[in-house]
Image (cartoon, rainbow, N blue to C red):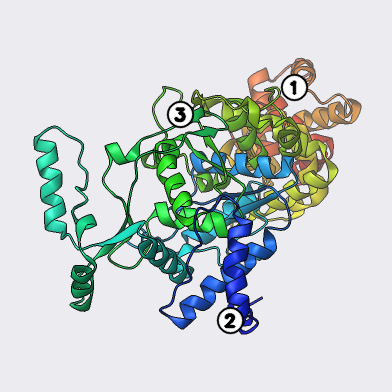
């Protein structure tokens, strides 16, 4: 239902009833929330959100959100927060919402919002509602909800819970410097709290630059966090009144997240533990609005192996980096959950369905999780083997590898037989357990798999005059032992083959076979090449070398 539709369907009687209904929905309300009276279009959105809030409040359901700022790429810490929200939602049959907190225009990065959502989809934890997917509680970008925040702030001003502040940046900077000089924590001195209404009206009439601040009150009620237990921070004694609407008209995080969580019917807020100390401030806002707050769960930090905090400056913690370098999403999720709490048991090898099944929020611990990225190759190898052994997933790997091969070796490939599904699938099965990701098969040591050598018999005879005999014996060996293709077995057979050729040393025999099979004079052992190529491809290459 559009905002205009909501407004046109509501008369004066209905507007009055909405005020009553809002108090009914939020039964903890201490006062009725007055409706804004300034801009007609803003009022439409405000009434529409109230209407939605009332209609949706009649149905129960778990609703959680992941609310990143689109100021850069999604990193491991953000992925873990999103994952825990996803798991909590799916565990309880609820909804997982992606909301972009893009109100800091100075740090906004074009395209970042789409890339964040793309990476969540890549990881297999796609949101149920998002900027791209839409939903009943949109828009899902805060920059498109500015009128609503302004109306919410005006409501707080009208009730006395917020006020206009006209202090200049110069004055605020002096306050900060003085506090630091006195070795105190910088804080606003709440000077504009005491302005009379006529003073405020005069300054607004003069169009003086201003912000809106929320009035912090003493007597914060304790709250029970799902992870950290009972908490209470007397913010009024430690901080000055926070800005909720900035000079550019955009809201700060404190106001926007409270308003959005309320109107989007968020039932549980799972976010990083760095926000724990701000929760009492947010609860004061919920009380000022007369709204029932969600349940909070503050997640412990994800740290590097050495105990330091993850930093965007590291570069290698961005999800796009892992995806680009061949990491499987299930391996990454398995790793970042295996090092933390929140599960009935910790065991490597879990996929998303296992993570949902094992997830138990009551088992979340307050201590930070230590991430060892050096274990990622082993996790990736394990999950890659699983994909190869799954027929449908293996077909997908084949398509991915075909694309990578074309991109890496397209100009060098003379024949495209090496791109046939059966051939690539055979390579994957032969090399599973040896490679950690698909990209390993693009390394120079594996180039022979995709570039069939064009070697003349004359070149092989320059290495050994027994080249023709060596190729014939190798062909017989492969035909005789096609079902016993292991490196250990082939090494023994190759030694036996060399002993049959009296005029040629073992080293020369291997050089001939390596050159015939790969066109290389140096590289992996011949036995390893043969295992990777498989009997059919070996026979093809040996036969072609003998006929040239």
Instruction: Point out residue 398 in the picture as x, y percentages from the top left corner.
Output: 75, 48
- Give the number of the mark in front: 1 or 2: 2
Kindly identify which residue carries mark 1: 487
User: Could you classify mark 2 by the number of other residues whose Cα lies within 10 Å: few (under 14), some (14-19), or many (20 or more)?
Assistant: few
Report the residue at 84% width, 29% height from top.
478
Secondary structure, mark 1, is helix
Depth order, front residue of 207/336: 207
Report the residue at 77% width, 41% height from top.
546
Q: Is residue 126 visible?
A: yes
Kindly identify which residue carries mark 3: 303
Secondary structure, mark 2, is helix
Secondary structure, mark 3, is strand
Residue positioned most to the bottom? 8
Q: Which quadrant of the structure image shows residue 485?
A: top right
Which quadrant, please, contains the N terminus?
Answer: bottom right
User: Could you classify mark 1 by the number of other residues whose Cα lies within 10 Å: few (under 14), some (14-19), or many (20 or more)?
Assistant: some
Depth order, front residue of 355/342: 342
Report the residue at 71% width, 50% height from top.
61
Q: Say whether marks 1 and 2 touch (CB < 8 Å).
A: no
Kindly identify which residue carries mark 2: 12
Res 392 label = none
Report the residue at 49% width, 25% height from top.
368
Q: Which of marks 1 and 3 is nearer the N terminus?
A: 3
Q: Which quadrant of the structure image shows residue 520?
A: top right
Give how far apart the Cα atoms at labels 1 and 3 are: 41 Å
Give how far apart the Cα atoms at labels 3 and 2 are: 56 Å
Q: Earlier in the sequence, mark 3 or mark 2?
A: 2
Report the side of 353 relative to 37 (left or right): right
């Amino acid at each position: 239902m559009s905002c205009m539709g909501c407004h046109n369907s509501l008369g004066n009687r209905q507007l009055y009833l909405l005020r009553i209904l809002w108090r009914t929905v939020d039964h903890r309300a201490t006062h009725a929330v007055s409706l804004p009276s300034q801009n007609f279009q803003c009022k439409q959105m405000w009434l529409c959100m109230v209407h939605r809030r009332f209609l949706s409040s009649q149905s129960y359901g778990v609703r959680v959100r992941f609310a990143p700022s689109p100021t850069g790429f999604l990193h491991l810490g953000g992925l873990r927060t999103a994952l825990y929200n996803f798991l909590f939602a799916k565990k309880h049959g609820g909804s997982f919402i992606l909301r972009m907190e893009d109100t800091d225009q100075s740090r906004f990065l074009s395209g970042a919002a789409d890339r964040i959502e793309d990476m969540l989809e890549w990881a297999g934890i796609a949101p149920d509602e998002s900027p791209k997917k839409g939903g009943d509680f949109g828009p899902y970008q805060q920059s498109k909800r500015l009128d609503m925040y302004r109306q919410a702030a005006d409501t707080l001003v009208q009730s006395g819970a917020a006020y206009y502040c006209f202090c200049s940046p110069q004055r605020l900077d002096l306050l900060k410097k003085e506090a630091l000089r006195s070795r105190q924590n910088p804080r606003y001195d709440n000077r504009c709290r005491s302005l009379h209404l006529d003073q405020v009206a005069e300054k607004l009439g003069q169009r003086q630059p201003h912000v809106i601040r929320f009035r912090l009150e003493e007597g914060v009620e304790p709250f029970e966090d799902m992870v950290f237990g009972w908490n209470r921070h007397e913010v009024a004694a430690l901080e000055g009144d926070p800005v909720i609407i900035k000079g550019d008209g955009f809201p700060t995080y404190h106001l926007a997240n409270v308003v959005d969580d309320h109107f989007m019917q968020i039932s549980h807020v799972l976010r990083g533990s760095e926000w724990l100390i701000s929760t009492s401030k947010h609860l004061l806002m919920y009380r000022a609005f007369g709204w029932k707050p969600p349940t909070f769960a503050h997640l412990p930090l994800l740290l590097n192996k050495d105990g330091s905090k993850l930093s965007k400056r590291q570069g290698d913690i961005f999800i796009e980096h892992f995806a680009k370098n061949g990491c499987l999403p299930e391996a990454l999720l398995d790793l970042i959950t295996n090092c933390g709490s929140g599960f009935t048991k910790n065991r490597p090898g879990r996929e998303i369905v296992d993570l949902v099944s094992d997830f138990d929020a009551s088992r979340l611990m307050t201590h930070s999780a230590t991430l060892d990225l050096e274990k990622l190759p082993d996790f990736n190898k394990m999950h890659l083997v699983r994909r190869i052994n799954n027929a449908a997933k293996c077909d997908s790997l084949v398509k991915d590898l075909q694309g990578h091969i074309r991109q890496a070796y397209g100009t060098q490939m003379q024949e495209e037989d090496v791109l046939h599904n059966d051939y690539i699938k055979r390579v994957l099965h032969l090399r599973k357990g040896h490679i950690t990701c698909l990209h390993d098969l693009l390394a120079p040591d594996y180039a022979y798999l995709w570039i069939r050598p064009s070697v003349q018999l004359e070149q092989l005879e320059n290495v050994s005059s027994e080249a023709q005999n060596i190729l014939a014996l190798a062909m017989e060996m492969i035909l005789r032992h096609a079902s016993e293709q292991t490196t250990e077995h082939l090494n023994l057979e190759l030694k036996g083959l060399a002993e049959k050729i009296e005029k040629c040393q073992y080293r020369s025999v291997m050089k001939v076979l390596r050159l015939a099979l790969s066109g290389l004079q140096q590289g992996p052992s011949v036995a390893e090449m043969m295992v990777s190529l498989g009997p059919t491809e070996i026979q093809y290459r040996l036969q072609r070398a003998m006929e040239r």
